Image (tube, helix red, strand yellow):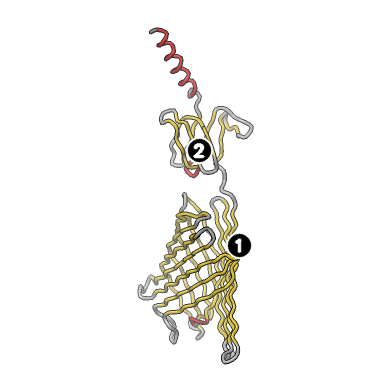
Amino acid sequence: MRSNHFIIFILTSFYCLQFASADQILLTNGDVIEGAVIEQSDDYIVWESVNFGKMTIAMGKVDSVLSSMATADQVTVNQSTVIAKPLEPVSLRGSVSVAGTFISGNEDREEWAGTVGLSHRQDHLRHRANFDYQFRQDQDQSSKENYNLTYAFDWFFKDNWFWSNNLSYGANDDRALDQFYTVSSLIGNQLWDNKGGALSFETGATWINETLVTQADESKLTWNWSTNYRKSLYKNMIFSHSNQLLVAIEDSSDSLFQGNFALDFPLVDQLFTKVELRWVYDNEPPEGIEKVDRRATIGINYSW
């Protein structure tokens, strides 16, 4: 019996000594857990806790790991070791699409449409830029031009939550806008963003200033709600949808909704045939302008 007790005592002592100088993991919510790192990747840490056993902790919830023993890959601070959480990799995404139509004979018409979009993210910061251009000329030589240049700066301040500030400038002959600009400050959430797809939403305030073709100026503060969705289908097709709702703060009957649906069919590598439908509903358009505006295009899109 004494020998059994001695063995139990040795095993218990060995277990206690194992954690006598245990490492500590500091979580972003302020919790500190003693133990040791079993495994570590860019996405998670497998942690052997003194009190709770083996735990898998997402890297996004880890502030730092403190250790009493340093290695060549660790930085010693006040006789403790800080294993820093790796930064998110730099990502640059973009797309360029072009569509054109030429008709001659009984009817002469020329149409061009092009879009360039870029997104760059590193750690907690993301930059987004987009340029959309449309040109149409009919047989009577009358032409219409629409364009919109947008830039957004996003700061991810907590997990997937971000604060977005963006500017846009453009013109739209179809809606009798000689020029317009908007300034927005929004709070958003990037629910997910990976190779399989992405979904995000944003809401906040947008200031709009419009100069009509009649040279009349209109300004208003609006509530802004928008979503962006992307989904990979059958591993080689891409469906995307975005929408935006703007409602005037002083007059809720003054609103505008615009939606965009697109389907990309693969050709070779990163080159796609793009089918796109845009739909705009303006509840209070300028005089002589229809409330509903639609546009369907088929073109070529290159994405990376």
Left or right side of 291 for 128:
right
Left or right side of 163 for 99:
right
| Residue at the image position 44 percent from the left and 39 percent from the top | 30
**Placement of 110 over or under 27, stated as above or below:** below
Mark 2, residue position? 45
| Residue at the image position 44 percent from the left and 61 percent from the top | 202
Count of marks, rendered view: 2
The span from disc 2 to disc 1 (Cα, nearest Å) is 35 Å
Q: Position of residue 114 (x, y in %)?
A: 59, 73
Closer to us: 129 or 271: 271
Residue density around tag 1, few if under 14, some if 14–19, many if 20 or more, within 10 Å = few
Q: Which amino acid does the dot numbered 1 rest on?
A: Gln
Closer to us: 55 or 32: 55
Label 2 SS: strand
Label 1 SS: loop
Q: Which amino acid does the dot numbered 2 rest on?
A: Ile
Residue density around tag 2, few if under 14, some if 14–19, many if 20 or more, within 10 Å = some
Closer to us: 8 or 118: 8
| Residue at the image position 57 percent from the left and 43 percent from the top | 86
**Placement of 106 over or under 126, stated as above or below:** below
| Residue at the image position 47 percent from the left and 54 percent from the top | 192
Quarter placement of the C terminus:
bottom right
Q: Tell me the quarter of the picture where residue 204 sits.
A: bottom left
Left or right side of 119 for 7:
left
Closer to us: 122 or 195: 195
Quarter placement of the N terminus:
top left
Mark 1, residue position? 270
